[in-house]
């Protein structure tokens, strides 16, 4: 069987790493006498009943290149031991239509050349949409890992990507019960749905020990940045006062990149003021800055306010281990990321989600998780922030978020019958 899987942007990488590992493990588990050779006369297995013939999986990894900076892409491949992509489409930045259109054009050529049995897509980024549509038009079966998430908010490009991908996919691998209910409510037959758990938690569990052994101060010294000069350029702060990190220092981690929070000055400026004037008054703020957000901070004249603040440490986008370690020790997380809501739930970090809705309700406090939706209203953020300062860490593990999801994903594909 030939499986071609696709990654495009940062949140895809931690989802594909365990899937690749599961394929490697499966291939190693096949007794060599059972491998069906294509070359007549070589490795010819003894005749065995058809049902017990095991064929190795041939795997091709395609990177669309939507995220291309080393810190957004290469660092994750290295940290998570993902083999270099077999094919990189080099799509890069652009409008949504440009990213999706260029990916479809390039991916169609790949499919015609490689002729896989399955295309596996993960998550909800533009690559997920572009590649599932292209594969279906080439009559190739599509499997969507992380199916059934719904925010109900069609102003989010990711929601459009989720809806289209799930509508087209042959096999929908769902991370939680709520997602399964969503799919059923849309009329998806049971035969296309499998409950497999959350594949991102496979990566978290596989790397938890290594992250735990890291020192927060070392990460701050290595990744923290200060502004020098008036050109908005930020440089390393290993030699600066802020790089010296005392044991037990309380800190908040901030990540923001959604257009709904950062693209308009009238929304983003009050958030920045709150972070600088109130959050940083209580705790040190560690803020790894997404490229989109960095551009907007500069464009809106907000950059100096945060870069010159004595209790805010701006950081380059972090690698997987650095972020996991910071999350493990944070007093509170303020984020608009989807994946961090899930990681906070499993780690027990109180999480303020700066969005009005979430496609991951299982992570919300009312469903037992760690996250509270605070939108971008400063009153709501303030109230929840105060509560979080006093909150205990309560790790929660939704059903099947057990570190074994990737194996269930592969089993579902191998056992699929149309
Ligand atoms: C994408 C995903 C989003 C995910 C996020 C995580 C979609 C629709 N959105 O949003 O779901 O949460 O990634 O990071 O696919 N840029 C760089 N270097 C890079 C990548 C991007 O400078 O390596 C710049 C681009 O020029 C662009 C901006 O960052 O101006 C946004 O990048 P883009 O890929 O369009 O979407 P994200 O906002 O990252």
Image: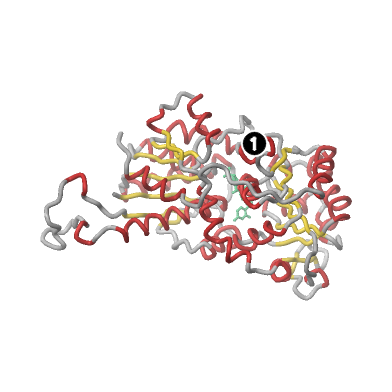
Tell me the quarter of the image containing the C terminus. Answer: top left
Note whether 251 is above or below 122 in the view shown: below
- Position in image of residue 366 (x %, y %): 68, 35
Q: How many marks?
A: 1
Label 1 CB less than 8 angstroms from ligand 1? no
Q: Look at 43% across and 40% down and name the residue there.
A: 132
Residue 70, quarter of picture: bottom right
Q: Nearer the viewer, residue 25 or 396?
A: 396
Note whether 121 is above or below 189 in the view shown: below
Furthest-bottom residue in this view = 239
Question: Mark 1 highlights which residue?
Answer: 367
Note whether 238 is above or below 353 in the view shown: below
- Position in image of residue 26 (x %, y %): 34, 56
Q: Look at 63% across and 68% down and name the residue there.
A: 213
Q: Tag 1, which secondary structure?
A: helix
Label 1: how many residues lie within 10 Å, few (<14), some (14-19) or many (20+)? Answer: few
Q: Look at 19% across and 60% down and name the residue there.
A: 33
- Position in image of residue 179 (x %, y %): 53, 34
- Position in image of residue 295 (x %, y %): 72, 53
Q: Nearer the viewer, residue 11 or 393?
A: 393
Q: Nearer the viewer, residue 274 or 24?
A: 24
Colouring convention used in this rendered image of the protein: secondary structure
């Amino acid at each position: 069987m030939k499986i071609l899987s696709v990654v495009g942007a940062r949140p895809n990488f931690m989802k594909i790493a365990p899937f690749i590992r599961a394929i490697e493990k499966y291939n190693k588990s096949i007794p060599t006498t059972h491998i069906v050779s294509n070359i007549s006369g070589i490795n010819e297995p003894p005749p065995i009943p058809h049902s017990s013939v095991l064929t190795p999986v041939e795997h091709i990894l395609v990177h669309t290149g939507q995220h291309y900076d080393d810190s957004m892409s290469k660092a994750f491949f290295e940290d998570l031991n993902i083999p270099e992509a077999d094919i990189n489409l080099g799509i890069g930045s652009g409008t949504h239509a440009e990213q999706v259109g260029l990916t479809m054009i390039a991916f169609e050529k790949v499919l015609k050349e490689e002729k896989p049995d399955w295309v596996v897509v993960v998550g909800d980024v533009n690559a997920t949409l572009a590649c599932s549509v292209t594969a279906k038009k080439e009559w190739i079966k599509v499997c969507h890992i992380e199916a059934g998430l719904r925010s109900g908010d069609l102003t989010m490009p990711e929601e459009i990507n989720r809806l289209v991908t799930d509508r087209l996919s042959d096999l929908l691998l769902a991370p939680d019960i709520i997602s399964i209910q969503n799919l059923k409510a849309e009329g998806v037959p049971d035969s296309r749905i499998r409950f497999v758990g959350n594949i991102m938690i496979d990566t978290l569990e596989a790397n938890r020990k290594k992250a735990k052994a890291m020192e927060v101060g070392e990460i701050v010294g290595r990744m923290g940045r200060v502004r020098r000069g008036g050109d908005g350029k930020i440089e390393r702060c290993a030699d600066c006062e802020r790089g010296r990190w005392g044991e037990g220092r309380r800190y908040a981690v901030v990540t923001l990149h959604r257009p709904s929070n950062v693209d308009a000055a009238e929304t983003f400026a009050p958030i920045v003021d709150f972070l600088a004037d109130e959050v940083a008054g209580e705790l040190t703020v560690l803020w790894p800055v997404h490229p989109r957000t960095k551009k907007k901070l500069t464009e809106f004249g907000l950059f100096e306010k945060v870069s010159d603040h004595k209790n805010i440490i701006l950081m380059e986008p972090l690698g997987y281990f650095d972020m996991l370690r910071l999350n493990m020790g944070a007093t509170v997380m303020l984020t608009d990321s989807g994946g961090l809501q899930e990681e906070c739930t499993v780690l027990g970090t109180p999480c303020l989600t700066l969005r009005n809705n979430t496609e991951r309700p299982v992570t919300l406090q009312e469903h037992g998780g760690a996250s509270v939706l605070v939108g971008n209203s400063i009153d709501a953020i303030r109230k929840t922030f105060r509560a979080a300062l006093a909150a205990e860490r309560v790790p929660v593990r939704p059903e099947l978020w057990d570190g074994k999801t990737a194996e269930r994903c592969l089993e579902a594909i191998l056992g699929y019958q149309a």
